[in-house]
Image: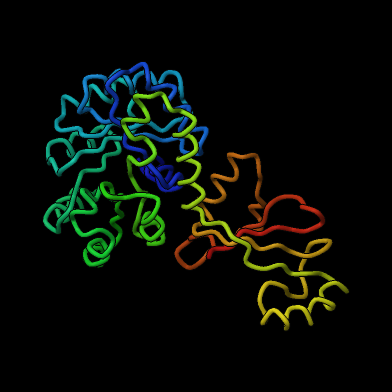
Amino acid sequence: MQAILETIHTIGLVPVIALDDAAQAVPLAQALTAGGIPAAEVTFRTAAGEEAIRRIARDCPEVLVGAGTILNIEQCRRAVDAGARFIVSPGYNEELVAYCLENGIPVLPGCANASDMTRAVNAGLEAVKFFPAGQAGGLPAIRALAPVFPGLRFMPTGGVNTGNMGEYLKDERILACGGTWMVKKELIAAGAWEEITRLSREAVETMLGLSLRRVILAGAAGAASCALTQALGGAGLEAGGDGTDGVIEVAAASVERAVYHLGRQGLSFDEAARETDGKGRTTSIGLCGRFGGFAVRLVRA
């Protein structure tokens, strides 16, 4: 169960999908994956949900597919038999949670108040769905409740979009964000797969928040850069560095998520150069190889 939760955390985004036609499931999953989001929560509130999960699990094994809007154990069994790798429910159902825990099924029950979160923690859960996030108070509500439940992480869903997900994901207690803005029903109905890919890619880029932090120039170039550095107010250029020509530092909102998503694009990282903080979270890591003579490091923003 822990491995699935960590994969959800690393991907960072979980599109919530409602399908009326199971034939749309595979091209939709492929469009999401092409945009950098190999994950989906397929809701059981439509008749096509179960078959959609089955098709994604069969034809898109790289996609972490889960079942949402699961209300009872019978639906849970059907979803898992179809290939769902995690279960999401809109509210807290003690029988459903107990069944999932007994059978090793990752489950994220909907919790929007202290009472349900208390039940979740007492059951042994490490993460819950915060739903409906917007109506339940959003990130301020999570931050108010989180200190009471140390170790519990949250997946806000409902009212999350490209404009506010960055603030959610900056908080270390956020497991991932769920949302529908990249999989709107009208886009699915129109078969607008390229647009879904574009929206997914935009969401990933926004989530990662990659930006140039500084360039550290080596040797004589580093010394010569000092005057320019002063002219720039001390920002951007510094002397020193371990690359042939220096080091380029790229800031990321989450180094772990950046490593995952850039790794999917073919980049590799030097694990020996990974640095972590006291909580085990990555603060920086170097990319393998040189780029135009420069070493490149990802650093936490």
In the rendered view, does 279 fall on the left or right side of 79? right
Observer-nearest of 47 and 129? 47
Q: How many marks?
A: 0
Image spot of residue 137 (x, y percent): 21, 59
Dividing the picture into quadrants, the one containing residue 237 is bottom right
In the rendered view, does 293 fall on the left or right side of 40? right
Image spot of residue 51 (x, y percent): 30, 17
Q: Quadrant of the N terminus?
A: top left
Which residue corresponds to the image point at 56% horizontal and 56% vertical from the top-left? 210
Q: Residue furthest right?
A: 220
Observer-nearest of 152 and 68? 68
Image spot of residue 268 (x, y percent): 66, 45
Chosen colour scheme: rainbow
Q: Is residue 203 above or below residue 215?
A: above
Which residue corresponds to the image point at 25% horizontal and 47% vertical from the top-left? 158
Which residue corresponds to the image point at 14% horizontal and 59% vertical from the top-left? 114
Q: Is residue 167 above or below residue 227?
A: above
Which residue corresponds to the image point at 66% horizontal and 57% vertical from the top-left? 286
Dividing the picture into quadrants, the one containing residue 212 is bottom right
Dividing the picture into quadrants, the one containing residue 190 is top left
